[in-house]
Amino acid sequence: MENVLTLAEKSVDYVKEITGQSSDDWKTLYEVRQSILPWDMDLAAIFGDVLNTHKGDSTSEDAPDKTDQVNAFGVWIGTLLAGEPGSSFWTETYLVGLDYALSGYSSQFLFVMASRIEEAFLQ
């Protein structure tokens, strides 16, 4: 059985292959970071509003504290918007996704959450 980090790396490669994400995307984000980095906490607030308004389908009693989730999302989105992800960014992202799955959030709920953040970003 593969360890979780190997699985994370393979999943990241798979996502890159499907989406076409490349180093040019990070370069673009880096070039415009001064304009978009101030959005990090606004996007985190939207994330928090959705979590607080819609429990989603999580039934876990061990679900992480929502304030911690919002703060962690603010750090994550700030790293993304800065265009400097570092070598462990996608692996850490994968592990956070696993944490959400273990907390009982479905893929559908997280997809809708990602769509809401994308919508806000594009506005």
Image (spheres, rainbow, N blue to C red):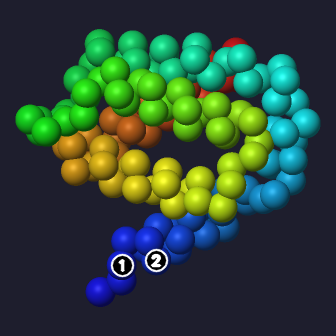
Q: Is residue 122 left or right of residue 1?
A: right
Do the CB atoms of the residues marked 2 and 1 lie less than 8 Å apart? yes
Q: Is residue 113 left or right of residue 118?
A: left
- Report x, y in % for residue 119: 60, 23
**Can the viewer see residue 38 in this picture?**
yes
Residue drawn 45% across and 33% down?
A: 72
Numbered mark located on residue 3 in the image: 1
Quarter holding the C terminus is: top right
Name the one closer to the observer, 23 or 92.
Answer: 92
Residue drawn 78% across and 59% down?
A: 22
Of all residues shown, which one is farthest toward the right? Answer: 31
Q: Is residue 121 left or right of residue 107?
A: right
Q: Secondary structure at mark 2?
A: helix
Q: Is residue 107 left or right of residue 86?
A: left
Tag 2 residue:
6
- Report x, y in % for residue 81: 71, 34
- Report x, y in % for residue 47: 45, 22
Residue drawn 87% across and 30% down?
A: 32
Residue drawn 29% across and 86% down?
A: 1
Numbered mark located on residue 122 in the image: none
Other-residue count near label 2 (Cα within 10 Å), few / some / many at <14 / 14–19 / ≥20:
few
In this rendering, the answer to whether 104 lies above or below 57 is: below
What distance separates the C-alpha of mark 2 from that of mark 1?
A: 6 Å
Type of residue at label 1?
A: Asn
**Can the viewer see residue 116 in this picture?**
no
Q: Secondary structure at mark 1?
A: loop
- Report x, y in % for residue 34: 84, 24
Other-residue count near label 1 (Cα within 10 Å), few / some / many at <14 / 14–19 / ≥20:
few
Type of residue at label 2?
A: Thr
